[in-house]
Image (cartoon, grey):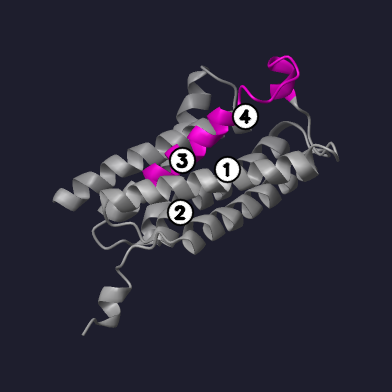
Amino acid sequence: MTSAATVSEVERYDVATIVGGGAKLGTVTAVGVMIFALVSRPLDGFAETLIQSVLILAGGLVVSYAPGLLVRVRTIDGLGWTALLGLMGALFFTLFDVVLLRPFDIYHWTWDQIGGGSGFWYIPVWFMGSAFLATLGGMNISKAPNRELMVLGARTLIMSVVLFTVIAASGLFPPTSAVMALAFSLGLALDLVVTAVQSKG
């Protein structure tokens, strides 16, 4: 007889989990992007950077850790499914983006302008980035000794803010929301290193 505790540890990678989870993740991403764009319009300077950075940190936590939680990642195979769920989230967001966000001109398409009017050069980068963040988050969850998500999330946030502060203070880049996105990615990777060290301790 299988105990309830054992069942909760079983990884999930059925169609409903991967596709349904991707749809949910894509929807949450689309809502976050709309909020980001609409809130940013009346703001500028420090207020704009602050609000955008908070939204980036919240969104980063969701797209990084939600896939691993939905899959209940424990193994290398589960990690692969976690990356796929992250990719599915990006695919569903792209559908929202093309069908709803672009026609209503919610935000400026700087990336299209850089690509000569085409978004096909950066959309694959978005896909890869989503799968990469989901992979890092999944690895962090699977290696955490007690799988305490609140601890992982809080540590990732703290490291991200510290890295943002260091980067901004160094003068290498201006303190913008884009730099916060970079700091979050680096903070997530650094948090994984800390988790891996703790798991061996």
- Kindly identify which residue carries mark 4: 176
Which amino acid lies under the numbered mark 4 shown in the image of this protein? Thr
> Magenta segment, which residues?
110-137
Residue 56, image x and y in percent? 59, 42
Q: Residue 102, percent across and down?
A: 79, 37
Indicate the quadrant where residue 14 lies: bottom left
Residue 61 pos. (x, y %) = 50, 50
Q: From the viewer's perspective, is the residue at label 1 or at label 4 nearer?
A: 1
Decide if residue 26 is in sight here.
Answer: yes
Foreground residue, 39 or 163? 39
Q: Residue at x 66, y 35 (%)?
A: 49
Question: Mark 4 or 2 closer to N-term?
Answer: 2
Of residues 121 and 138, the one nearer the viewer is 121
Residue at the disc numbered 1 = 90
Local SS, label 2? helix
Q: Is residue 83 magenta?
A: no
| Residue on which disc 3 sits | 131
Alpha-carbon span between mark 2 and mark 1? 12 Å
The overriding secondary structure of the stretch rendered in magenta is helix
Confirm or deny contact between disc 3 and disc 2 (CB under 8 A).
no
Q: Position of residue 119 (x, y in %)?
A: 68, 25
Q: Nearer the viewer, mark 4 or mark 3?
A: 3
Sooner in the amino-acid sequence: mark 1 or mark 4: 1
* Residue on which disc 2 sits: 67
Report how far apart the C-alphas of labels 4 and 3 lie in the structure. Answer: 24 Å
Residue lying at the far front of the rendered structure: 15
Residue 121 drawn in magenta: yes
Q: Is residue 58 above or below residue 7?
A: above
The image quadrant where one finds the N terminus is bottom left
